Image (tube, rainbow, N blue to C red):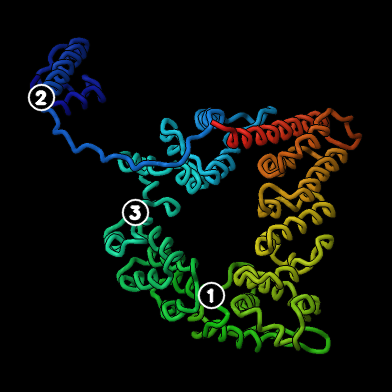
């Protein structure tokens, strides 16, 4: 064969009529045979010409995992979930993969060690689903990190904030911390900064400040975002300096963090601007929105150009009020409580803008008193919370029991069509009153002839969030009911199948919990 291996490959791709390698002769058929013969010789030559590789160092020994092993039944359940446990939503069989997050969280809480044979499958699914990573890596333990050092596809386990071995070690070792900060991958550095902010906020800030000017803009933004953990007044000088950063996004994030510190100088400046725009008259609250966005406002994080369809003055007003401390308003309105302030009329159609800004400020400052005032009574429609469209963010501020009670009353009053996002922020498993309210609302929707697939999202949540003790209550609804005269054809059968699936899933969740409690 006169040609190189690359010549043979090129001829095989293009055909011997268009490209014939050196040394191959004859007509088209003979040339094709000659090409295959040359390829056979070339393969032998390439294989025979390889030198034996040099043996690399043996992998280090894996760290011991002292946690108890899973009960056998739970191990078999995990194996079925990781190796094809999913089911089509077109039948009544539960989808095991949808239950995997809860299973992992429970196994982690109960302190079990993952079976070594299942670690590759567990790492594969954690790589594909970021929502599972924290629990999956904590459950997988040191063996997973050992495997991740050997397989590039699993390197995410070394960089993940919840289980980064480098970050976890470096937090307690100043030399390792400095080395990882200087030499680590970006994700490892973010993980280190986040972990360090939990243990030593001042030390984390000093570490970031030392290299801040040399960081890329996109990296500075992520590092700035990590300062949300452990945010305190000690961070104010650094954040105030960041208001003049080269990156607009970094400036905006710094302003947002400063506005979450009610005693910061920026919060004081925003309060002063807001007071000049909002005041109380005998008829109600009056609003005089800004007529211009000056350089000082822009420096403090106010974006001058509004989005399409939004007026400039309303846009600027919303940003000022959103960044002002909520304590500004009781003082401004004669000592009134948040409930009394929210109940005041707002003149000249400024109410939606003002209430929406108060909602955003409440979420930013995590103020439960204002959250209660803005949410109002669950039985009422509209109100201040209608200004932001979805009360879920305000609900997330409230204690878990109060949150569930509010949503239960809302569902009882208005049904499920507007409740999906609210249900998503309630603690799992749902409280007994909330669970009953959801099941009753589903029953009412069925009796009313509603389309069952319109509630598929709520059904999916119920499978994961209802207390398994509700299984028998749901089972009573799974019997085929008479078709509603005003309903869609065949809806009764679909509802029956949906309730059967929900019943089966709740019973399975109860069984899975028992398996994780069983003795060896």
Q: Position of residue 385 (x, y in %)?
A: 73, 66
Comparing labels 3 and 2, the label whose residue is closer to the camera: 3
**Are the residues at dot 3 and dot 2 in contact (C-beta closer than 8 Å)?**
no
* Vertical side of 348 occupied by 504: above or below: above
In the picture, measured across the screen, residue 216 lies left or right of residue 478, that is left
Q: Which residue is mark 1?
A: 303
Q: Name the secondary structure under disc 2.
A: loop
Task: Residue lying at the far right in this picture: please name it.
Answer: 485
Q: Name the residue nearer the viewer: 104 or 189.
A: 104
Q: Position of residue 484 (x, y in %)?
A: 89, 34
Q: Which residue is mark 2?
A: 49
Circle 1 Cα neighbour tier, 10 Å, few/some/many (<14 / 14–19 / ≥20): some
Q: Name the secondary structure under disc 3.
A: helix
Label 1, label 2: how far apart the Cα atoms are: 66 Å
Q: Earlier in the sequence, mark 3 or mark 2?
A: 2
In the picture, measured across the screen, residue 342 lies left or right of residue 313, that is right
- Examine the image and state in which quarter residue 196 appears: bottom left
Q: Which residue is mark 3?
A: 166
Label 3, label 1: how far apart the Cα atoms are: 39 Å
**Are the residues at dot 3 and dot 1 in contact (C-beta closer than 8 Å)?**
no
Q: Which residue is located at x 86 percent, y 42 percent?
A: 444
- Examine the image and state in which quarter residue 353 appears: bottom right
Q: Which residue is located at x 41 percent, y 78 percent?
A: 238
Q: Name the residue nearer the viewer: 17 or 100.
A: 100
Circle 2 Cα neighbour tier, 10 Å, few/some/many (<14 / 14–19 / ≥20): few
Label 3, label 2: how far apart the Cα atoms are: 41 Å
Q: Is residue 310 visible?
A: no
* Vertical side of 35 occupied by 62: above or below: below
């Amino acid at each position: 064969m006169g040609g190189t291996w690359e010549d043979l490959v090129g001829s095989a791709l293009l055909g011997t009529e268009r490209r014939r390698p050196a040394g191959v002769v004859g007509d088209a058929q003979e040339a094709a045979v000659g090409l295959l013969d040359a390829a056979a010789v070339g393969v032998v030559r390439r294989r025979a010409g390889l030198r034996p590789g040099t043996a690399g160092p043996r992998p280090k020994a894996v760290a011991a995992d002292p946690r108890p092993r899973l009960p056998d039944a739970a191990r078999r359940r995990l194996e079925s979930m990781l190796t094809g446990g999913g089911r089509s939503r077109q039948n009544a069989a539960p989808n095991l993969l949808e239950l995997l997050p809860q299973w992992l969280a429970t196994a982690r809480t109960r302190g079990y060690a993952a079976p070594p044979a299942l670690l590759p499958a567990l790492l594969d699914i954690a790589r594909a689903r970021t929502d599972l990573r924290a629990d999956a890596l904590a459950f997988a333990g040191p063996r997973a990190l050992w495997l991740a050092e050997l397989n590039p596809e699993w390197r995410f386990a070394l960089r993940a904030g919840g289980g980064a071995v480098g970050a976890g070690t470096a937090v307690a070792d100043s030399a390792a911390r400095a080395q990882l900060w200087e030499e680590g991958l970006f994700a490892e550095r973010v993980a280190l900064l986040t972990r360090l902010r939990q243990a030593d906020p001042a030390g984390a800030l000093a570490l970031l400040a030392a290299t801040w000017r040399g960081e890329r803009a996109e990296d500075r933004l992520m590092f700035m975002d990590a300062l949300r953990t452990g945010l305190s007044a000690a961070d104010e000088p650094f954040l105030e300096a960041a208001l003049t950063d080269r990156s607009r996004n970094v400036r905006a994030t710094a302003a947002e963090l400063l506005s979450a510190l009610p005693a910061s100088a920026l919060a004081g400046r925003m309060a002063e601007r807001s007071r000049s725009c909002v005041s109380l008259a005998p008829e109600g609250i009056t609003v005089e929105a800004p007529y211009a966005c000056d350089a000082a406002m822009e420096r403090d994080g106010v974006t001058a150009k509004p989005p399409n369809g939004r007026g400039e003055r309303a846009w600027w007003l919303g940003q000022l009020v959103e960044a002002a401390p909520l304590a500004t308003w009781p003082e401004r309105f004669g000592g009134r409580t948040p409930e009394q302030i929210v109940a005041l009329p707002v003149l000249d159609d400024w109410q939606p803008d003002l209430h929406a800004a108060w909602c955003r400020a409440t979420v930013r400052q995590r103020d439960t008193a204002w959250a209660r005032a803005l949410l109002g009574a669950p039985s009422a429609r509209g109100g201040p919370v209608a200004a932001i469209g979805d009360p879920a963010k305000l609900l997330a501020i409230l204690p878990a029991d109060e949150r569930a009670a509010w949503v239960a009353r809302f569902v009882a009053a208005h049904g499920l069509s507007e409740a999906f996002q609210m249900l998503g922020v309630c603690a799992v498993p749902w409280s007994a009153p909330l669970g009953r309210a959801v099941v009753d609302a589903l029953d009412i929707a069925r009796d009313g002839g509603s389309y069952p697939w319109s509630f598929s999202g709520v059904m999916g949540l119920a499978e994961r969030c209802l207390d398994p003790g509700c299984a028998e209550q749901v089972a009573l609804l799974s019997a085929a009911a008479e078709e509603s005269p005003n309903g869609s054809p065949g809806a009764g059968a679909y509802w029956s199948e949906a309730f059967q699936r929900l019943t089966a899933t709740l019973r399975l969740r109860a069984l899975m919990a028992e398996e994780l409690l069983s003795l060896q």
